[in-house]
Amino acid sequence: MLRVLVRTGSDACRAVSTSAALSFPLKNEELSAKEIWERRSKLRIPKLQKDEQLSSKVYFAPEWDLEKKPNLDEGFVNPLKGYGMTPEKWEYYNKVVWPPNYIVPETGLPKPKEVFHCKESVHFSPKRMWAACQLVWKMNVDEAITQLDMQQLKGCTLLMETIKKAKTRAADEFHIEFPSQMYVADAFPVQSNIVKGARRHAHENWNTIRYRYIHIFVRLEEGPAPAYKQNHAPKSGWDHMNEYYNYLRSRTVKYSI
């Protein structure tokens, strides 16, 4: 597989594959989606810090200017401003360049290509947007767009537009040949600004109105979507039946001889 470094509008270098169909080595073509996710699920097993083996830095990322402020404020950098995930931090992940055919040492699988996209300053409630994000989380891109299109809700419409824009960027900007074979790895809202207003009621009663604005973060990842959203496979009725049988057979009589 050939990979080239493409320099787009900004000064960011990106590793772009010229053939998405050959993004996996030949030795991993026989692995099914279930076997791939079984390997990746092993990363969720907690380890003690003394037992962790940190891999060496093999990627290139531009230096982060700690003195640069996205809101153009003057004075010293205030750590209480701009904490958490911001659109600048999210877009920074798109500028990271990994070596060609990089194999993740923890799983032995090639690192899938990712697309990070953010829709900024949307006038909507973060709690209602969270429900729409949970609907399409770990779902195929085309299936997520179809599901959101069927929901007659404003939050689903905003999230659908965000996913469509991320899919377009995957094909045009990052040159991914088959963007339909990606899935929604992450989708979540973060509240950005609150604009306060006032509303007058009878007898000069004034109440505060809060107009909430959010950022919608979406991360698309190449490859098949997992079979389930939880960390472990959901139990079927037969599994619950076997657990109940084991419980019945393990009962003992208290104070028995």
Image (cartoon, rainbow, N blue to C red):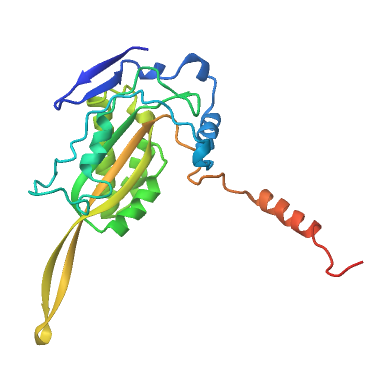
Give the farthest residue toward the top.
2
Q: In which quarter of the image is the N terminus?
A: top left
**In this rendering, does residue 29 appear at all?**
no
Give the percent coordinates (x, y) of residue 115.
30, 32
Q: In this view, does 248 lie to the left or right of 154?
A: right
Foreground residue among 40 and 185: 40
Location of residue 128 (image quadrant)? bottom left
> Which is more toward the observer, 16 or 184?
16
Residue appearing at x 71%, y 53% in the figure: 243
Percent coordinates x, y for residue 110 in the rendering? 44, 23
Q: Residue at coordinates 84% horizontally, 67% vertically from top-left?
A: 253
Q: Is residue 70 above or below residue 23?
A: below
Residue 212 placed where, x, y %?
20, 60
227 left or right of 197?
Answer: right
Q: Residue at x 83, y 63 (%)?
A: 252
Which quarter of the figure is the C terminus placed in? bottom right
